[in-house]
Amino acid sequence: MQNQELLDRLKFRASWGQIGNEKINSEAAIAVVDPNLGNAVFGPNEQTYPSATPTGLANPELRWEETTQTNIGIEFGLLNNRLTAEVDYYRRVTSDILTAVPIPNYVGSQGDPVVNAAEVLNRGFDFTAGWQDQRGKFGYRLNFVGSTVYNEVLALGEGKEEIFGGGLGFGGILGTRTVVGLPIGSFYGYVVDGVFQNQEELSSLPKRGGEVVGDLRFKDLNGDGVIDEEGDRTYIGNPIPEFIYGFSAGADYAGFDFSIEFNGQSGNDLINAKKMARFGNYNYEVSYLERWHGEGTSNFEPRVTNSGHNYEFSTRFVEDGSYLRLRNVQLGFTLPETVSGRLHLSSLRVYVSGTNLVTWTDFTGYTPEVSSENVLSVGIDGGSYPVAKTIIAGLNISF
């Protein structure tokens, strides 16, 4: 490293570790019965008795969830550390993932049991890069951070070939299917093939059952002439983003300072479930302005209905989850020390800032940042509350 002026710092690194996950309900391994549900009437004399119901099923075979991660990376600084960067390759395998797996309602439990459901691989690159420099009174800095993500289910729990999830809480088929070889919680449903335009199409083309003219047509994937759950649902989207990133810039000159930050993600899909959950004639999506209302008027937006066939999990509700958001921008001015000293102040700074001002996205929900506590239901937007847009003006004074 001597007698050279290019590299200021160079470091190779590697790490390996294992960690467990305790972030589950402490009662997940035992049966829970709730006796505080009122009374029930039994017998010829119609006497009332205290009632109880199971709210959680026992699973005494629960094991710790375990994550094993390997990292190999490099970090360096160039040109008097004006340019710095770090690059890491990571491989993370999570075994015995703990999650609540949906069970049929006829079992009688209010809650789904927590099980060791799957083994999942995440791998990719984490990297950061930054440039900073000072030219007289003018200083500036640029930073970028990003992560690539590849997600794949390696194995499922004993005796399981698939795990369904992603319910909306009001019945209907589940909208995610976890199988070996695909991302966890992959969207699973019908492929929309247009809208029934007339009675001739309705009579001759494969149907789910109960459709009328103006309803959605689904593709007959197995070619048996009937649209059904077993043969005609397929993988229709990936909820896991392939790339997560952010970048920022800042500058200062003669007491003025400016900073701006962006963040975003790409390569993932979202289910617009607030468009799917329709129980009354109120606040329909803007897309209904392009609805079918006669032959030839639309071949993608069906007639207006409140429920039923048109609200099955399908490609109709799959949308691009990519976005870029202006997370924060700030402009400030600090009085020179000569001026603040005359005012008997150590410093005085005025500023104005804005947070979450603009989001560029094709997603038609309230926000593309959708979260879920259940790994089987990631990317299903049931109307997530949007992040607030905030504009602040402030004054910092130090005495």
Image (tube, rainbow, N blue to C red):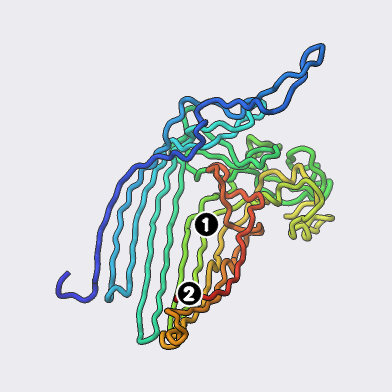
Q: Position of residue 286 (x, y in %)?
A: 75, 60
Q: What residue is drawn where x is 78% and y is 56%?
A: 291
- Determine the image quadrant of residue 202: top right
Task: Name the residue type under label 2.
Answer: Ser
Separation (CA) of disc 2 from disc 1: 28 Å
Element on which disc 1 rests: loop
In the depicted structure, whether residue 94 falls above or below residue 296: above
Q: Which residue is mark 1?
A: 267
Q: How many marks?
A: 2
Mark 2 neighbour class, 10 Å CA radius: few under 14, some 14 to 19, many 20 or more: some
Identify which residue is drawn at 47% across, 62% down.
245
Inspect this view and state whether residue 183 appears: yes
Residue 349 vs residue 67, the one in the foreground: 349
Give the numbered dot on residue 259. Answer: 2
Is disc 2 placed on a helix, strand or loop? strand
Q: Check disc 1: other Cα within 10 Å, few if <14, some if 14-19, many if 20+.
A: some
Quadrant of the image containing the N terminus: bottom left
Identify which residue is drawn at 63% across, 51% down: 381
Screen quadrant of the C terminus: bottom left
Q: Nearer the viewer, mark 2 or mark 1?
A: 2
